Amino acid sequence: MTFRAHSEVSPLKPVVVHRPRSEGPRLTRETIRGALLRVSVRVAVVSSLVVLTASVGLATPVSASSAPARTVLGTVASTGPAAVVCSAGAHTLGTLGDRLYPDTGNGGYRSVHTNVDMVYAAATNLFLAGNNVELTDQATQCLTSFSLDFERTSADTVAGPNMTVGSVTVDGKPASFSFVQPTYPGDPAGQNDPNPAAHEVSQTDPVGGPKDNPLPPACSPELTSTKASLQNVQNGDQCPANKLVITPSKPIPSGATFTTVVSYTGRPGVHHDGDGTTEGWFRSSDGGFVTTEPVASEDWMPLNDFPTGKPTYDFYDTVGAGLTAIANGILVSITPHPADSEFADGSTTWHWTSAAPIASYLVEDSIGYYTLSEHTGPTGIVFYEAQDISIPAAKQKKNLAIMNDQEEITDFESQFNGPYPFTSAGIIIGTPPASFEEEMQTMITFAGGAIGTSVLYHENMHQWWGDNVTESAYNMTFYKEGLATLAQAFYTALLAENAAGGPSSAAGKAAFEASLVRQFDQRYASAGSAWDGAPSNPTPYTYFSDATTYERPMAAYIALRQILGAANFDSALQEIQRIYGGGNIDEAQLEVVFHQWMPNQSDSCSQRLDDFFTQWFDTAYPKGGGTNRPQITGPGLDGPGFYNATGGCS
């Protein structure tokens, strides 16, 4: 995603928001290998335990989801080896103290596959009868109930959603359902805590607000203004009831695969974020334009709305004749239908499929009058290009010239990241004035009728970073935005290289490297807001801050490339893709791989690299720059550097 810039009040002294790695055992090759195999666990508060008699032996301990979880609660019943404890799945995948969307995600199951059966009337912007999602999941505990995220209504009565759930079935049988408020993750009173203070909005932990609530937030604000002075106005408000809790007719055994169908109708819409911007289903003159980072997929469909929720998808979009549906993956078929009571001029069903898993915020499904073309590149990747036909012809022509560069950009970025991870790639340019562009998996979205080359490098880089290897939680967004911004730095360096003689010339290669050094030095010299917030600890308001979430991590990666050497840096990136492709990564796992490619594996250099990550990713400094910024950089860069005169770190 391209940035949404805001500022926040800086601390008075450097604040490290994560435990520095140096406080634990020193990393060696052996501990690194062990770290790659470790399993972290996430909080899953369970309640309403029941006992289910079965012949499958003792139950597997309760797990929040397939995502890395941090704590497992729940035990088997003590009534014998055939007794299995069943309980409600967790209503969040957040952890105690989270302030970034702590309400999202759902535990007790693993997302496997989703069929989106859309029936949509573009003229009225409504989902019609027959509209549903079919979610296939695998239970990771014995479930008496489970939940989904679905913001079916909003305080925004114009652009927000207004949808109604008609029915829910589980494995073909009717299931009861209700909507409840989220509870802050880790609440010792359980997720049905009757205390209203356990269900409050805030930018911060603790909530604070008019009643000085000492508890952590249960959800993030939904602001209608981007003004910094208004960022805390909702602190202490009650969270909306956006958790769709489903109770099947009988408990679902641990390990069982089950299918849930949620049928719903009404108007999809946008979500208001903690910085006052919007995301979601943007109304256009001819349908809807979908761009949804970080959470607004739930404003047009119910799902497990968390970065670790990554099912595969099929889309069956039935829309009025002449309209085009554009989604993730490969276009399988286009099936026309005769006129009926819903579509007087007939309709068409567009079937798209993605065999690759898709993170919750990367699901694309836009409807409108689009031109759509495709071609297959020499490596077999299918490239799609779509533009809204209402964009003026001259502008469409300029857009197309940039869109046609995607194949070349993909080849360029593959030099660093390794092979492109998907079977298709694409770009859709819509007309609504969304506040950002987004790396929707295999179908990048550009809003406002225009596209830019540098931003295309950024969003295309995300296909590896964010899409294939997804962040483990919202506070890891800096990791993938930094790498995508690095792609823009590579593009700037590429222009310098070409101007100096091209990649095959010594002068061109030198110009490429010199450009990266220059870009780092310019950012390191800044006395601005890049240093006064830790990239790994944003508030909802600063979540998409340009300086902290994009520019500072990008500079860190340039420095890391200087520390490891260009070849080793590329090898580390490619190893991360091999290990974590199709899944998720956390900060420790990311840093472990870079450790493996350190040219100097001494204890002192390992310690110094630990300190480098802590300073660049996890520390908030006072304003001013100078000493109030990271004091470890890299060879050839401004600042203290990394190695000593002999190539060591003592």
Image: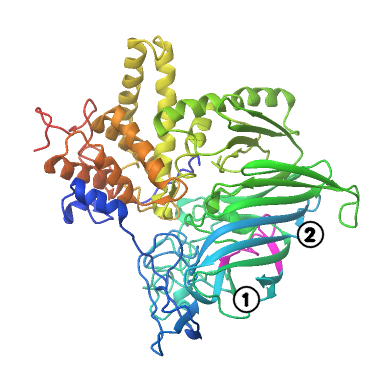
Q: Give how far across and how far down residue 208 sits, in percent.
A: 39, 69
Residue in the image at 53% along x and 65% along y: 138
* Residue 352 vertical position relative to residue 206 in the rendered view, above or below: above
Please tell me in which quadrant of the rendered image residue 443 appears: top right
- Amino acid carrying mark 1 in the image: Ser
Q: Is residue 122 shown to the viewer in this render?
A: no
Residue segment shown in magenta: 148-165
Report if the CB atoms under discs 2 and 1 are less than 8 Å apart: no
Please tell me which residue lies in front, 157 or 171.
171
> Colour scheme of this structure image?
rainbow
- Amino acid carrying mark 2 in the image: Leu
* Residue 322 vertical position relative to residue 515 in the rendered view, above or below: below
**201 to the left or right of 391:** left
Return the mark for residue 128: 2
Considering every residue shown, the one lying at the far front of the view is 55
Q: Is residue 18 shown to the viewer in this render?
A: yes
Residue in the image at 43% along x and 14% along y: 498
* Residue 551 vertical position relative to residue 142 in the rendered view, above or below: above
Q: Give how far across and how far down residue 608 sits, in percent.
A: 17, 42
Magenta stretch, main secondary structure, is: loop
Return the mark for residue 178: 1
**286 to the left or right of 577:** right
Q: Residues within 10 Å of mark 1 (few under 14, many from 20)?
A: few
Could you tell me which secondary element the residue under label 2 belongs to? Answer: loop
Q: Give how far across and how far down residue 636 sits, in percent.
A: 22, 25
Please tell me which residue lies in front, 512 or 74.
74
Location of the C terminus by quadrant is: top left
Q: CA distance from mark 2 to mark 1?
A: 21 Å
